[in-house]
Amino acid sequence: MAGSFRDLTVFKKAFSLAMEVFEVTKKFPSEEKYALTDQLRRSSRSVCRAIGEGYRKRQYPKHFSSKMSDADMENSETQISLDFALACQYISEGERNELVVKSEEVGRMLNHMIENPEKYKPRNK
């Protein structure tokens, strides 16, 4: 079974979160289009990109862990941008908390991958 990064639960959850971020940022003011809106969308999507890139190199545990660490960094960046969105009153505390809880779950899964890269190494055929 070759599998795909799209089959990973962490990818599915990160992708879903990125789509929720996309939806919530639609109501941000137009002056944030090239600032907070763009940054929040890009960081949340970068989590998925890094997972996909790292999964393709999973035969190299150090590279895999590095890419998952990049994904975790982008995930943290997303959380910080959500804090700014709350402080600017673009989202409610409830919206922020719901998204952060989902982001923290993705972070825990990424941390497991970082600490256990051998579990994701491709099997010999």
Image (spheres, helix red, strand yellow):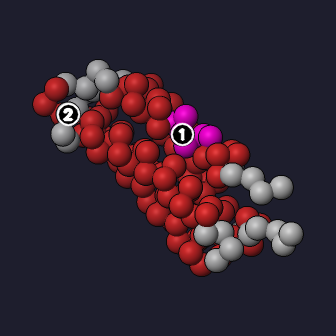
Q: Secondary structure at mark 1?
A: helix
Residues in magenta, as a range: 12-17
Left/right of residue 15 with respect to residue 36 in the rendered view = right
Q: How many marks?
A: 2
Which of the image's four quarters has the C terminus?
bottom right
Whole-percent x and y of residue 28?
25, 26
Residue sitting at 29 percent across and 45 percent down? 39
Query: What mark, if any, has residue 33 been given in the picture?
Result: 2
Query: What mark, if any, has residue 15 been given in the picture?
Result: 1
Which of the image's four quarters has the N terminus?
bottom right
In this orientation, does residue 95 appear?
A: yes
Residue sitting at 18 percent across and 34 percent down? 32
Q: Identify the amino acid type marked 1.
A: Phe
Q: Tell me the quarter of the picture where residue 60 sits.
A: bottom right
Badge 2 crowding class, 10 Å Cα cut-off, few under 14, some 14 to 19, many 20 or more, is few
Left/right of residue 35 with respect to residue 8 in the rendered view = left
Q: Secondary structure at mark 2?
A: loop
Whole-percent x and y of residue 11?
60, 46
Whole-percent x and y of residue 106?
58, 48
Q: Earlier in the sequence, mark 2 or mark 1?
A: 1
Q: Tell me the quarter of the picture where residue 84 sits.
A: top left
Outermost residue, front side: 125
Secondary structure mostly seen in magenta is helix
Q: Identify the amino acid type marked 2.
A: Lys
Outermost residue, left side: 31
Is residue 58 highlighted in magenta? no
Outermost residue, right side: 125
